Amino acid sequence: MNWRWLSSIVLAAVAAIVMSSALVAQTTKTAAAKPSAAAAPAKAAPARAANTAASVKKTPWGDPDLQGVWNDATSTPLQRPAGKGETVNGDEANLFEEQLANDLSRDRRDGGPEVDVNRAYNEHWMDARRLKITNDRRTSLIVDPPNGRLPPTVPISAERQKIRAERQAAGARFQAGMPNIATEMSLPIRCIIRTDSPPYLPTIYNNDFQIYQSPGYVVIQPEMIHSARIIPLDGRPHIGKSLKQWLGDTRGRFEGNTLVIETTNFRNDDTVYQGANPETYKITERFTRVADDSINYEFTIEDPTTWTKPWTAVVPWNKIDPKEQMYEYMCHEDNFDIVHLLTGARAREKNPALNLKKPETR
Amino acid sequence: MRTRVWRVITPLGFAVVIAAVWLSPLGGQQAPAPRAAAPAGTGFPAYRAPRLNGHPDLNGVWQAFVTANIDLEDHEAQAGPYTELIGEYSGWPPGQSIVEGGVIPYKPEAVAKKRQNAANRIKEDVSNDKTWHNLGDPEMKCYMPGVPRATYMPYPFQIVQGSSPYILMAYEYASTTRTIRMDWKQEAPTDTWMGWSIGRWEGETLVVDVTGQREETWFDRAGNYHSDMLHVVERYTPLSPYHMMYEATIEDPKVFTRPWKISFPLYRRMEKNVQLLEYKCVPFTEEMLYGKFKKGAS
């Protein structure tokens, strides 16, 4: 039983990513009109924020103040679903939000008992903010290309194809409950990195980020997994090219009120987004405090050996209620899952009758 | 001789520091504090650290240079595991106790557990959730080290102190972090590996009260340990631009007869390009922990 619960964690994580890239509008109940999305007047369309206001809060040493605990959860998908405009309004916004919420929900009881078991990781675990579209009612987090979709990919080398095929095969074994070895599982399952490597995109839970600042530094502490992304602002060069890291190596500067950070030196083991090529991958992230309780997080990814052109997304970060706190997220220390997954696979090798039913495909 | 020189230099240096603080944009509002006494026995003249937001500025990358991670108490040079395979790579250097009075005041009935820990330090068994943590030094398994061990492990850590109610301690080992909540009222909501840290300023000293630590962490490779009643009070006191004194009072009525204290200096890492690198050690533990469950292993 446990392994099913666990594999559903993985499914949830995978689903979070998949759902960001493709919306499967699949409602079985009529979306009830809900005032939340439509009540407020629509804000100006897709924010590529540049808050130049002189009134932006500053630290005592004069940097724009980004300190605090922020949350980036939203249901707005990374890519724009077919047939949608840049933004949605009125009833369309309500329907859109309702559809997304329904689809992201794992507890919707529309697939029969077998499917429901695989959805055991239900809304109890879900950040409620994950079920709301962005305040500016965009239909995609991607703002460039203007169609809200990832640019076309370019053909990849035979070597990268081979690596991808191996990862896919390992992923398929995992989904079938038959992993061979811990090291073929994903980095989040192995508790090496979770949502702490950029770009930061919303997921099922723990979408919190705490920002610390000191003279000459900005530090981002993502909730998963208790790491610190320490960003020097003093213009120093990157670490040596041979030093690769899962979080890469980040350098930053303030341009007006925007923190601009660039990250290189990523490891070549499925760390960078969607199997891009760390040799040619570059990510630039921009943080602009657009209101006391809101930061615009914008990132641009360039990788000419993966996509035909750069692409940019904007994700709103909202300050969490001061009564909320970000707590320690521990993972490897009690990673019972990984043993259950492996012992489950070994048991199934000995007794094929234990084989999994075909997992839910979505 | 040294003392005499300091007598001359100290008032001069102090005047310069005061002037600098007084003239600096951050310090202008602050009345200069009286000279803070260095912790007793450090042999250093009083020092007043530069100010940030009115408090001593502890920002920087720091590191301890003691061997306490091997053993808090006196320890001779010893063969670590597998010297027969890797020779001196597995040798552990000697070191003197950092415990005040030299010895940890275990309750008589608690000593056996410490000895047992030491005997089992390189064992592990994760085949059962319920006994998952029973064997082995958590460091060997790349688990978060807890407090105060994180401070004297042989890796740098960075203090990030700004103008929010939080101070971040980021440790290179296992990419561990710990948030210090300044003047916070809330008690530890649950036990965690790095505990619940409430900070306050006492003159030149950052005092951190740490509760809510998981009982599974150890103090060192020698198996020195604590229970879920662990209460640690840390004191970070700058002694110069380049070093500070670290003291921790450790209290645990289940394991020790009385509170006891450790102290050692922390040194500022001075390399121009110093930064914490990633030491995510999980991959170095996977074969040890999970190898027996892989395909074809049994």
Image (spheres, coloured by chain):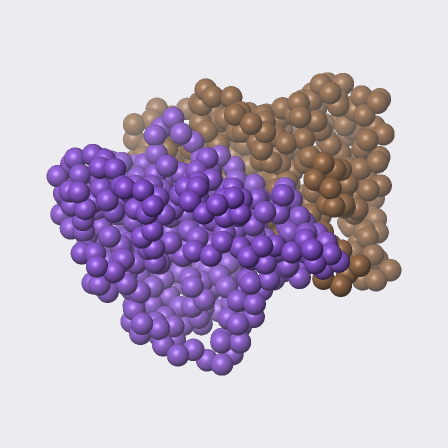
Chain colours: A purple, B brown
* Image location of residue A75, percent across then percent down: 32, 46
Whether residue B297 is visible to the viewer of this picture, yes or no, is yes
Residue positioned 22% across, 42% down in the render: A94
The answer to whether A147 appears left or right of B165 in the picture is: left
In this rendered view, identify the residue nearer to me: B135 or A219: B135
The answer to whether A26 appears left or right of B203 in the picture is: left
Question: In the orientation shown, which residue stands out farthest toward the bottom?
Answer: A158
Residue A134 against residue B255 in the figure, above or below: below
Question: In the orientation shown, which residue stands out farthest toward the front?
Answer: A112
Residue positioned 33% across, 26% down in the render: B30
Q: Quadrant of residue B258?
A: top right
In this rendered view, identify the residue nearer to me: A338 or A261: A338
Residue positioned 59% across, 47% down in the render: A4
Looking at the figure, which quarter contains the C terminus of chain A?
bottom left
In this rendered view, identify the residue nearer to me: A358 or B87: A358
The answer to whether A63 appears left or right of B109 in the picture is: left
* Image location of residue B165, percent across then percent down: 39, 30
* Image location of residue B153, percent across then percent down: 65, 44
Looking at the figure, which quarter contains the N terminus of chain A?
top right
Residue positioned 34% across, 51% down in the render: A26
* Image location of residue B78, percent across then percent down: 83, 48
